[in-house]
Amino acid sequence: MRKFPLPNRKDRILQKNGESGAFWEDRKDRRHCGIDLYAPEGDPVIVIENGEVTNVGIMTSPEMIPYWNKTYYIIIRNHSGLFYKYGELGFSNVKVGDTVESGQLIGHVGAVLNSKKIDKNAPEYIQKLKDKDSSMLHFELWEETPVAEDNNYLGGGNWFGDKGPRKLLDPTLNTLALLIIN
């Protein structure tokens, strides 16, 4: 059975189109490639459905952008062939090649932003988040292996370019379905 990725979240609110953290949100100079599921830092993140870990890496870090904290991503190919990218995790406890089962703990929610480092040079949407809790699960859905490194893709799930990345899917309906069955 498929599971909602944040088992401790009882409200399970998804952003509406155009809201901060929504799929393909227009951030003026970039677009958002997934959805952000806000949760307290340290909350468990579980696998939605059975699959295999295909990639684990650094999603954000202060070496990339000074106001980012270090967070991680995990890419899992599920048995239906789709790829889920669980991002902005505080840490990961799986490795490439691991087989994972629906409901299995794979990591914990991380805090993406270091509010002390956000200044007037940060993008407007980041400045608006300065005094808010930035802990979340960034979630992407792909038909094929997700983009992890591309000139148009910036860690944190941002896409710079006129056209979106090939095979990126809107995860909103998929995630909404999990809210109904869980």
Image (cartoon, rainbow, N blue to C red):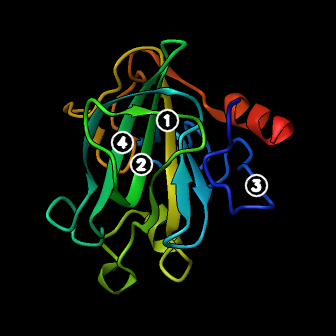
Quarter holding the N terminus is: top right
Q: Secondary structure at mark 3?
A: loop
From mark 3 to mark 2, how far is it between C-alphas? 17 Å
Asked if disc 2 and disc 1 are in contact, CB closer than 8 Å, the reply is yes
From mark 3 to mark 1, how far is it between C-alphas? 17 Å
From mark 2 to mark 1, how far is it between C-alphas? 8 Å
Which residue is labeled 4 in the image? Answer: 74
User: Which residue is depicted at the point 61% across and 66% down?
Assistant: 39
Indicate whether 141 appears above or below 124: above
- Return the x and y of residue 114 as percentages of the image width and height: 35, 78
- Return the x and y of residue 81 as percentages of the image width and height: 48, 12
Which residue is labeled 1 in the image? Answer: 140
Q: Quadrant of residue 90?
A: bottom left
User: Which amino acid is tagged 4?
Assistant: Ile
Which residue is labeled 3 in the image? Answer: 12
Q: How many marks?
A: 4
Looking at the image, is mark 1 or mark 4 earlier in the sequence? 4
From mark 3 to mark 4, how far is it between C-alphas? 21 Å
User: Which residue is depicted at the point 53% across and 40% down?
Assistant: 47
Asked if disc 2 and disc 4 are in contact, CB closer than 8 Å, the reply is yes
Looking at the image, is mark 2 or mark 4 earlier in the sequence? 4
- Return the x and y of residue 9 as percentages of the image width and height: 72, 61
User: Which amino acid is tagged 1?
Assistant: Glu
